Image (spheres, helix red, strand yellow):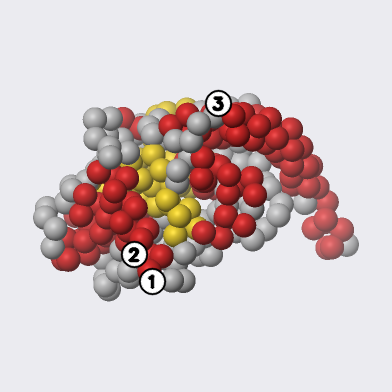
Amino acid sequence: MRERRHLLARVPDLIFTGYVAALLLLSMPPAFVVLLCLPSGRPSGRLLPAWAQFVIRTSGCRLTVEHASRLPSDRPAMLVANHSSYLDSVVLMAALPLEFRFVANHGLLSVPMVRTAVRKARYVTVNRGEMKARYRCLLDMAATLRTGISVLAYPEGTAKGGPTLLRFRSGGFRAAVQAGCAVVPITIRGTHDVWPYRRWLFHRGAMTVTIHEAIEPGGRARTEIARICGLARDVIEGSLESPDSQVAADCWSSPLRTSAAPPIPGAASLRRHSGRPRGR
């Protein structure tokens, strides 16, 4: 009886998963064909967010963007976000109204369509298992920032932690300090509920992307890298733990929205990140 009830409880998720699979099967091939026809760089980079917005809108999952005005419009920035789901990158492409380059795991290059998208959009790639590759990624991030284009990285380096925030790696922060760019922390909530890590059933739900105040580098010393890394992690962790930052109820018909969010408790007195951040 209990197993039957458990199976019945999963029926809505099975139906929603089938709907999302059909949506991807119908939208990805034409988007891929257009991508192949576009020149690399900015044109290809603009197509991917447009596709992501279409997918999010059509899925019926509500995506709310809080404090989008905090994103710098006149200079590049190092964007850093928590990572708990495969869905995070699609959500960020749909949510952030600025040009940026992702830092993508080299493992994604084994998927032909994803490899083409990564290369056409000129995303930065990294093999975290090789020291030389991590250093090359650091140089690529700093070079991209110096050209005036923002970079987005997941300092945790993996989505394995799920909703639990893991220790931050220092590569993105080191690149920001070397390029003299501000770091903008971003909190993503709800994606793990919609598509949990290493699960293949989707759950219709609401998601929120919160943009936090930029953290300006105060120099190029090693201690500055650790300071910015700690501050960014504390801001994101505080937002995840805030009782006022729960996403809204599930909803089928809900376009992308922007709204103001309540202040994060204790954000004015951020605590230092304990421990030394890891290199990329």
Measuring from the top left, give residue 55's x and y in whole percent. Answer: 62, 33
Residue 12 visible somewhere in the drawing: no
Q: Amino acid at mark 1?
A: Met
Q: Which residue is mark 3?
A: 255
Whole-number angstrom distance, CA of label 1 to CA of label 2: 6 Å
Q: Quadrant of residue 155?
A: bottom left
Real-space Cα separation, disc 2 to disc 3, in angstroms: 40 Å
Residue in view at x 28 percent, y 30 percent: 73
Please name whichever residue, 278 or 254, is drawn nearer the observer in this view of the structure. 278
Discs 2/3, front: 2
Q: In the rendered structure, which amino acid carries the disc numbered 2?
A: Tyr
Name the N-terminal-most of marks 2 and 3: 2
- Residue tagged by mark 1? 131
User: Is residue 279 something that shows in the picture?
Assistant: yes
Q: CA distance from mark 3 to mark 1?
A: 42 Å
| Quadrant position of the N terminus in the picture | bottom right
From the viewer's perspective, tell me whether residue 256 is left or right of residue 81.
Answer: right
**Tag 3's secondary structure?**
loop
Q: Is residue 223 left or right of residue 230?
A: left
Residue in view at x 87 percent, y 58 percent:
4
Three-letter code, disc 3: Pro
All told, the count of numbered labels is 3
Which label was assigned to residue 135?
2
Mark 3 or mark 1, which is nearer to you? 1
52, 186: nearer the viewer: 52
**Residues at discs 2 and 3 in contact (Cβ within 8 Å):** no
Question: What residue sits 65% from the left and 49% below the top?
Answer: 112
Per the image, label 1 sits on a secondary structure element best described as helix
The answer to whether 254 is drawn above or below residue 226 in the figure is above
Secondary-structure class at tag 2: helix
